Image (cartoon, grey):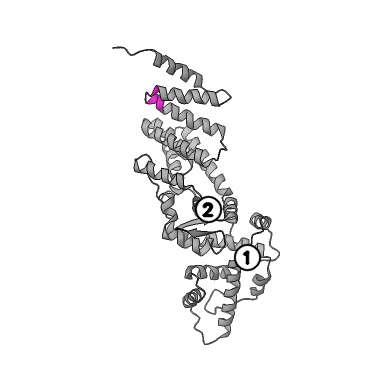
Amino acid sequence: MLNKVQVLDVSAKRDGLYNFLKENNYISHIVIDDLIMLLDIIDEISKNKSIVKNEKLIIDLVAKHFKRSSAYIKLLLDFLKIQGILNDGEDFNLTPKELLIRNIDRYYLTAEIIRFLLLNVDWNTYLKSKDIYLSLESRMYIFALLSQTTKKLIEETDTLRENGIYKISYFGSINKLNSSLAFKRISEEVFERLNLGSVENESFIPNDIGRRIFEYLAKDLLEQYDKLLDECWDYYDKGNFEQAFDIAKSIIKVLSFVPEAYNVLGCVYIKMGDIERARDMFNFAIDVYEKTSLGDFEVDFYISLYYNLGLSYYYMNEYFRALSIFKSLKKTIPYEIDNLDELIEGIKHMTIVGPIN
């Protein structure tokens, strides 16, 4: 998660984001140039006594003249205010700190710009949802990262939803999200100006540095997911299935493609006796996991998904399918899995013995 914006100071401590940007040789030249341009304009306005110093009017005029959005210009003005470079009042004057922003280390300035812009874009207006456990700061990274999802996965998700297997989350499927006017507007106002990617065919596509920055910014988010999923399993192990279910659903409302959240839902559905829905959750989780892991499988999670899927077929009396999955697990995984041999032998016995009239 991004820390609170720091006030620009040449002696300020350089943090992880600063070091990351310097290591990757990334400076947001376009936005910095926009800030310098804005400083020059404000300086001229402050010297001209005849100009009406109405902030909204000035924002609209600057935006129109330089072909920027008013929302973007306002963000830059707010950045100057919070840094103490622009007086937050009717005077509309620059402070002596103006020289600082013109001469400060550009890597440091870039870090503070990214920190501020990503925290202050009006995400809350566009990305509202109920029962969100993840913070607003984390959600914006999700939306950035969502744009990298493969087209094939999007298409298959639509198919699953149309067949009633997968119910669409609050935010909608990723393709609809990417093509939404809200996401496009935010992408153009912030991501493109930061040179993190571009909007192509109504979809934001991160460039190489954009992907690396989003990946870096998402580190805390991934840790947050791990904590939430640990909470899910803790509640599940204690028999509080409703709480486990609610947390898993809240994760899916924010990001539809977290396979372990579907694994939790499947286990809860088994406890509820809704075995068919449990099977669908496990199948979907496996499908997502195999398409997003890029071959880098976590063995314990892989076992959990397939074991649970086999168990759901077992409870549905589809013994041959269950047996096939369990035997495949035994053959693929080099170490012993609890109860697996007993299940295999039990199913073999059940399928060998014929029915009684």
Q: Residues within 10 Å of mark 1 (few under 14, many from 20)?
A: some
Which element is circle 2 on?
helix
120 up-or-down from 293: above or below: below
Q: Nearer the viewer, residue 123 or 241?
A: 123
Residue under the point 58% across and 74% down: 37
Residue 22 in which image quadrant: bottom right
Residue under the point 46% across and 20% down: 343
Q: Residues within 10 Å of mark 2 (few under 14, many from 20)?
A: many
Furthest residue to the left? 357
- Residue where numbered disc 1 is placed: 7
267 on left or right of 113:
left
- The x, y position of residue 152, in whole percent, is 45, 45
117 on left or right of 265:
right
Label 1 or label 2, whichever lies nearer to me, is 2
Furthest residue to the right? 11
Question: Label for residue 128?
Answer: none
- Residue where numbered disc 2 is placed: 141
- The x, y position of residue 322, in whole percent, is 43, 24
355 up-or-down from 268: above or below: above
Q: Nearer the viewer, residue 291 or 51?
A: 291
Q: Nearer the viewer, residue 149 or 19?
A: 149
- The x, y position of residue 354, in whole percent, is 35, 13
Magenta span = 313-319
Q: Amino acid at mark 2?
A: Tyr
The answer to whether residue 30 shows anywhere in this view is yes
